[in-house]
Amino acid sequence: EEINEDDSQSYHPPNATIKSETLTYLRDVIIQYNLCPFASHPLRENNIKVATVRGSDDDFVAASIAYELAALSGEDVRGTTLLVAPEYYPDDFERYLRLVQCMEEDFMEEHKLKGIVQIAPFHPKFRFEGSEEDDVDNFTNRSPYPMFHILREDEVAIAVKRLGGDA
């Protein structure tokens, strides 16, 4: 699935390549090194949607995130979404993170989505607050492209319970 800011513009790499690289990253990094103990189950069950939003327009990318948050918020919906935004400030983590925070603090609050869905940030320059740039912990959320991982809170709770409460 692709969401383009401007359908007439040709982006590189193409969306199919981005999806393939994202799934390879998920399998070969996140799952192989057990960086997220929840990731293998939805991948095995084919319950991971990879969508691509192109461009760097804040409003357009925010609208794409809002769409995916709403799509996963229904009572009977299962799965997780990786919304990949290759052009959305891949070299500026702080700029990217401002949109994540805006979506969490404004959109999710306004639409009463807190406790239903959440956004986990992944970015090529990811950095936990208070950490040094090369701290090993930062690499758990470093990805080939900026992406917004949208998860259902109830599925996270089930996965944590399966792991004996250890996330």
Image (spheres, rainbow, N blue to C red):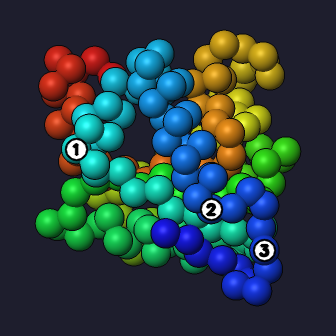
Q: Is residue 26 above or below residue 4?
A: above
Identify the residue position indicated by label 3 in the image: 10
Q: How many marks?
A: 3
Return the disc, 3 or 1, that comes first in the chain's sequence.
3
Q: Quadrant of residue 25?
A: top right
Residue at 52% x, 36% y is 24
Q: Residue at x 28, y 49 (%)?
A: 46
Helix or strand or loop: what does disc 3 sit on? loop
Q: Secondary structure at mark 2?
A: helix
* Residue 57 shown left or right of residue 34 in the figure: right
**Could you give the CA–CA distance between mark 3 and mark 1, rounded to whole angstroms?**
33 Å
Q: Earlier in the sequence, mark 2 or mark 3?
A: 3
> Is any part of residue 22 visible from this angle?
yes
- Provide residue 55's location: percent of width, then percent of height: 75, 69
Residue at 58% in and 58% down: 16
Q: Residues within 10 Å of mark 1 (few under 14, many from 20)?
A: few
Q: CA distance from mark 2 to mark 1?
A: 23 Å
How much space separates mark 2 and mark 3, taking CA atoms? 10 Å
On screen, 106 above or below 120? Answer: below
Name the amino acid, label 2. Answer: Asn
Say which amino acid is labelled 3. Ser
Q: Would you say 125 lies left or right of 66 here? A: right
**Label 3 close to label 1 by CB (< 8 Å):** no
- According to the picture, the residue beneath numbered tag 2 turns out to be 15
Give the labeled residue for mark 1.
Answer: 45
Quarter of the picture containing the C terminus is: top left
Q: Amino acid at mark 1?
A: Glu
Is 86 positioned to the left or the right of 16 in the image? right
